[in-house]
Image: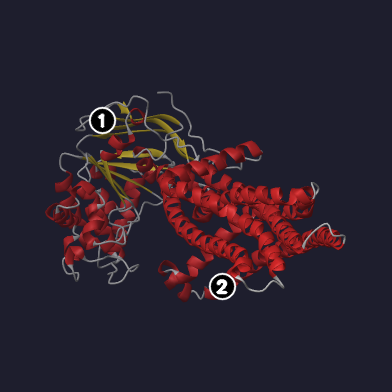
Amino acid sequence: MTPMRPERKSLKPMLHDPALKLSYMLRVFGLIWTAARGWTVAWGILLAVQGLMPVALVYLTKPLVDGLQATVGRGTTWESVRPVLMVAVGIGGILLLTELLKVCLAWIGTAQSELVQDHITDLIHAKSASVDLAFYETPDFYDHLYRARGDASNRPLALLESSGSLVQNSITLIAMAAVLIPYGTWLPPALLVSTLPAFYVVVRTSRRYHDWWKHTTTERRRSQYLGVVLTEAWHAGEVRLFGLAGYFRNAYRELRGRLRTERLALLRDQSLSRVGAEVVALLVSAATIAWMVWRAFLGHATLGDIALFYQAFQRGQGLMRALLTNVGQIYTNGLFLVNLFEFLDLETRIVDPPNPLPAPATLKEGIRFRNVTFRYPGTDRVALRDFSVTIPAGRTVAIVGANGAGKTTLLKLLCRFYDPESGQIEIDGIDLRDLSLTQLRRMITVMFQLPVPYQDTARQNIAMGNLEAEKDLSTIEAAARDAGAHEVIAPLPKGYHTLLGKWFAEGTELSAGEWQRVAMARAYLRQSEIIILDEPTSFMDSWAEAEWFERFRALARGRTAIIITHRLTIAMRADVIHVMRYGQIVESGSHQDLLARPGLYSQSWRAQVESASQSSETQATPLVNS
């Protein structure tokens, strides 16, 4: 396989032409159809029926008024009242049906909303879990994720509702125009002219708001971050100790004040524009009604004609305004949905090969890095340059070095969270890029440097390492014993069924060292061929290290183990020690071999011994940079 440097897909806005926005709107309708097909069909039918109700009401106005006018002075006989009464009953029935339709549409809309939101949120979760780890190294990714999350909650349904209103209002408007045309063919164009200013205002303000909203994504994310610092437990101790609450509160208030001022300025301009548009609509409406009243004075129209015309024109004007507003809303939602689909369309580069090779069931040769060069996305700093090392199968290897030496980078490359810029990484002679990701990662178990505290039971925390063993408590308990976590879990109020963490009621918080033991049990439960532990004893006291390592050696027997550590008291017990500096292996050998050489390892070891001689307990000293 030809090595290549991983490229980060550009997250810059790509969509500015209407055709692409239209294609995204069609994709939204496809998502809605997939998530709530039956509800959408029912919604469409009821929407069409509801669109005809206002026209029926307006149409019955003329016979009602004319019937009342004809009845006046004739008495209240059944023959004179019956026509008017029948029309009134019809109007009452239409009003009742309209209310029933509103209730049904609200119920259907809620069902649609829940289904569509869950479906799109699931798509966002799936994309977030599948994108390359490189994306998490870029602020641009978090901006897109922030916008996508916000849009997923309401924009698709808002687009559906706007489109539904557009269809419904179009049906009503066409029928209303048919009612008005007998009074004058110029009336429908007059309706359009009276509402065009409002349409212009909607489109203009929508565009300005979208531009502002997108431009301020980073600032809004920062205000969210400041809120987290002030309210979550992770920062609470340091915020209080260093007296940082005032600093963060002021920063939050200043940022929110600026955003609020800009938002209100946009709203002010929008409101003034709307007032101007309403004045135009009112003048056109007044002129047409005055014309109709003048016709009545001339004897060319009845009171029923005036009542019908007034309602038809007023409703038509409202419908035309609503129709153009719907178009503006669809345009606005289309702008925002670009963000959602830009996120969903992010390209994942770390993928399975077209024809993956079978992964070895048992490691026989080992792991080999061949002339690997790698740098993290968005930086020119080389983390590894022409790096080569061999880790024999079935051996325990320690990798030591100062911070920034590249130790954890080896872990990330071996798990194929990233691909190298050049060179190959092989397992039993097979390039990692020729294996399926699932099989490769199933061969590896990792305990990361910062243990992940899942807000779940102790049992489930360990079972996360191998969900196939989730129901086997004895296997979970065995992994806990191997990791030294059983002594932590057993005394808890409900043992392995105790909820860990403080996010939920009745949860029990653990210390950092206890969380580390639980994470270690999770790694042990996986029973993989390759075991990688990143700073496994960073939260343990020095007395517990030797006991832990002996248990670990017994567990790792017959498997390939890599321990990334600063602590030479751990590294000294490994079969082979590799010392890293500036992305290169500078020394390799056993503990005794390295002590016999005048190198970085022996220098750091002597510093540790000198420190220990001045203390009542053995200290773990990291490698020094010299």
Which residue in the protein does label 2 denote? 249
Residue 540, position as x, y percentages in the image: 26, 61
In the depicted structure, whether residue 508 falls above or below residue 417 = below
Judge whether 94 appears above or below 440 on screen: below
Left or right, residue 278 beside residue 433: right
**Amino acid residing under circle 1:** Ala
Within 10 Å of the Cα at label 1, are there few (<14), some (14-19), or many (20+) other Cα atoms? some
Q: Taking 96 as reference, is 370 left or right?
A: left
* Badge 1 element: loop
From what the image shows, is residue 96 above or below residue 183? below
* Mark 2 Cα shell of 10 Å, populated few (<14), some (14-19), many (≥20): some
Task: Kindly indicate the quadrant of the structure image that contains residue 74.
Answer: bottom right
The mark nearer the N terminus, 1 or 2, is 2
Residue marked by disc 1? 359
The answer to whether residue 123 shows anywhere in this view is yes
Residue 78 image offset from top left, x and y in percent: 59, 69
Q: Residue at x 23, y 55 (%)?
A: 462
The location of residue 85, given as percent across then percent down, is: 59, 66
Residue 552: percent from the left, percent from the top?
18, 50
User: For residue 79, what is the image quadrant?
Assistant: bottom right
Q: Quadrant of residue 428?
A: top left
Image point (56%, 47%), residue name: 337
As rendered, which of 403 and 456 lies closer to the eye? 456
Secondary structure found at label 2: helix
The residue located at (29%, 52%) in the rendering is 568
> Which quadrant of the rendered structure holds the N terminus?
top left
Q: Amino acid at mark 2?
A: Arg
